[in-house]
C-alpha cells in the first residue's frame, strides 16, 4: 500500500513539474507553427517580449540589420553566448520565429 502511494506521489510530482516549453504546442489554428508563441517560450528570457531587452549581451532585435537568412543561421546554429536551437526547433518553427522577430522590427 505504502509503495503504491509513493509511486503515485512521484507521478503527480512529475505531472506538476512537466511545464517545460514544448514548441510542438505552439501552433496556430491551422496547425502552422506560431512564431510569436515560440518567441515567448524560448527567446524572451534574453531578448524581452518586444525583442529590445538585451540580457547577457543579447542584441536588440528591433535594431537588427541582419537578413532573414542570417537570422535563421544564428537561431539554428547559435552565435557566441546565444545557444543553437536546431535541437529544439525544426526548420518550420525556426522560420516562424524568425518571421516574428522581423515583425518586431517593422512595428517600431
Ligand atoms: C540565453 C540568452 C538568449 C536566448 C534565450 C536567445 N538569445 Fe538570441 N541572442 C543572444 C545573444 C547573447 C546574442 C548576441 C550574439 C552575439 O554576440 O553575436 C543574440 C543574438 C540574436 C540574433 C542576432 C541579432 C543581430 O542583429 O546580431 C537573433 C536574430 C536572435 N538572437 C534571435 C533569437 C531567437 C529567435 C531566440 C529564440 C529562439 C533567441 N534569440 C534566444 C542571447 C539569447
Image (spheres, grey):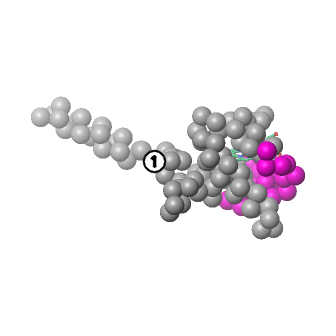
Residue 62 visible in the displayed image: yes
Q: Residues within 10 Å of mark 1 (few under 14, many from 20)?
A: few
Residue at the extreme right: 65
11, 64: nearer the viewer? 64
Q: Is residue 35 magenta?
A: no
**Residue under the image location 30 percent in, 44 percent down:** 12
Which residue bears the numbered disc 1? 19
Quarter of the image for residue 77 reads top right
Magenta part of the protein: which range?
49-69
**Quarter occupied by the C terminus:** bottom right
Q: Nearer the viewer, residue 102 or 31?
A: 31
**Residue located at (42% from left, 44% from top):** 18
Q: Is mark 1 within 8 Å of ligand 1?
A: no
Front one among 35 and 58: 35
Residue at screen point 60% across, 41% down:
90
Left or right, 89 with respect to 20, comes to right
Q: Position of residue 60 (x, y in %)?
A: 80, 53
Amino acid at each position: 500500500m505504502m509503495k503504491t502511494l509513493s509511486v503515485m506521489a512521484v507521478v503527480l510530482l512529475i505531472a506538476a513539474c512537466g511545464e517545460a516549453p514544448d514548441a510542438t504546442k505552439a501552433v496556430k489554428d491551422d496547425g502552422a507553427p506560431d512564431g510569436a508563441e515560440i518567441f515567448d517560450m524560448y527567446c524572451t528570457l534574453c531578448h524581452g517580449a518586444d525583442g529590445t531587452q538585451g540580457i547577457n549581451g543579447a542584441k536588440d532585435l528591433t535594431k537588427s540589420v541582419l537578413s532573414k537568412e542570417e537570422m535563421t543561421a544564428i537561431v539554428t546554429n547559435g552565435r557566441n553566448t546565444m545557444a543553437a536551437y536546431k535541437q529544439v526547433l525544426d526548420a518550420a518553427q525556426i522560420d516562424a520565429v524568425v518571421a516574428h522577430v522581423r515583425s518586431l522590427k517593422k512595428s517600431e
